[in-house]
């Protein structure tokens, strides 16, 4: 298995302000330096990065510079994370236009995966029909990814309409999209990461490892996630893809990346 790291620890998780008034410009964005993140991730011994769509869009007119940044660090671009509401018919074309642009840039940068989060929760709560709408939107986005040679997957996330195990179970039969579990988000949503891997192993094409302790995301080894058991299950199911470590924020991103890499190497024997 190959081990990567998300760049969002450098600057935390925000959104592009243009999206407040223009859905097609609503990108995830890490506020820190992508260049510093790449240097620190390479120094910690990882083999690839995932980044937000908004941080890739920053290189839209200087893609050669981004490719040189990766090649100079010896890192691969594993994937790009994007998302949408998916359930509102009127804005869906603009959301698909954003995903199309993201996929085009991701392919140009050499990415393998397009990771999709989302499924809006209405002010009045989730409607039954929202699950079918989300499934349709995800299938559309997966089609865009395929046209650009990318592998799309869905990432259940806190704050969306798929954060609990029962919500994931409602969605999965309605769409063919593969799954990208985030182990800590599953636990924080009341689920069991081992149970999700066991149940949906045939649909997992990519996975995020994240540790969790007392309501907070922490470097690997500082929480209670059973990563050894997760690895055993993944191997039994024939998984041999990327494992990307993610940590939304930390006072010292480089230190956190090093702590997680040491845990992977020394405890899980992942080199």
Image (spheres, grey):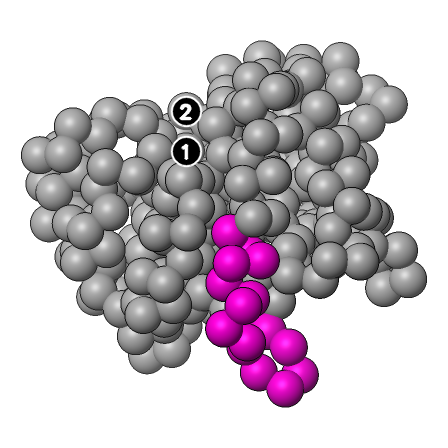
- Residue closer to the observer: 133 or 122: 133
- The tally of labels here is 2
* Image position, residue 93 (x, y; %): 78, 45
The residue shown at (51%, 58%) is 132
Is residue 163 in view? yes
Element under disc 2: loop
Q: Is residue 91 left or right of residue 118?
A: right
* Image position, residue 220 (x, y; %): 30, 54
Q: Which numbered marker is on residue 4?
A: 1
**Disc 1 crowd, CA 10 A, few/some/many (<14, 14-19, 20+):** many
| Residues at circles 2 and 1 in contact by the CB criterion of under 8 Å | yes
Judge whether residue 132 is colored magenta.
yes
Judge whether residue 167 is colored magenta.
no
Image quadrant containing the C terminus: top left
The residue shown at (86%, 23%) is 61
Among all residues in the image, which is located at the extreme bottom?
124
The residue shown at (22%, 65%) is 192
Part of the protein shown in magenta: 121-135
Q: Is residue 142 left or right of residue 97?
A: left
Residue that badge 2 annotates? 47
**Disc 2 crowd, CA 10 A, few/some/many (<14, 14-19, 20+):** some
* Image position, residue 194 (x, y; %): 17, 56
The residue shown at (89%, 55%) is 22
* Image position, residue 85 (x, y; %): 66, 59
């Amino acid at each position: 298995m190959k081990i990567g790291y998300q760049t969002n620890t450098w600057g935390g998780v925000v959104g592009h302000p243009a999206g407040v008034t223009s859905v097609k410009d609503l990108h995830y964005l890490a506020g820190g330096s992508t260049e510093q993140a790449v240097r620190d991730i390479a120094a910690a011994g990882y083999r690839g990065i995932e980044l937000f769509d908004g941080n890739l869009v920053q290189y839209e007119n200087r893609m050669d510079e981004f490719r040189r940044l990766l090649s100079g660090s010896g890192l691969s671009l594993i994937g790009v994370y994007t998302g949408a509401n998916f359930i509102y018919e009127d804005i869906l074309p603009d959301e698909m236009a954003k995903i199309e642009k993201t996929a085009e840039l991701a392919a140009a940068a050499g990415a393998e995966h397009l990771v999709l989060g989302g499924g809006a929760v209405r002010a009045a709560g989730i409607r039954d029909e929202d699950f079918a709408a989300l499934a349709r939107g995800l299938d559309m986005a997966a089609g865009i990814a395929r046209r650009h040679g990318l592998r799309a997957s869905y990432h259940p996330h806190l704050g969306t309409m798929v954060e609990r195990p029962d919500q994931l179970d409602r969605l999965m039969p309605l769409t063919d999209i593969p799954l990208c579990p985030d182990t800590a988000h599953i636990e924080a949503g009341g689920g069991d990461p081992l149970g999700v891997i066991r149940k949906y192993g045939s649909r997992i094409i990519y996975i995020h490892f994240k540790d969790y302790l007392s309501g907070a995301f922490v470097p690997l080894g500082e929480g209670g996630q059973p990563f050894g058991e997760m690895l055993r299950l993944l191997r039994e199911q024939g998984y041999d893809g990327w494992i990307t470590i993610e940590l939304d924020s930390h006072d010292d991103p480089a230190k956190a990346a090093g702590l997680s890499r040491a845990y992977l190497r020394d405890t899980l024997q992942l080199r």
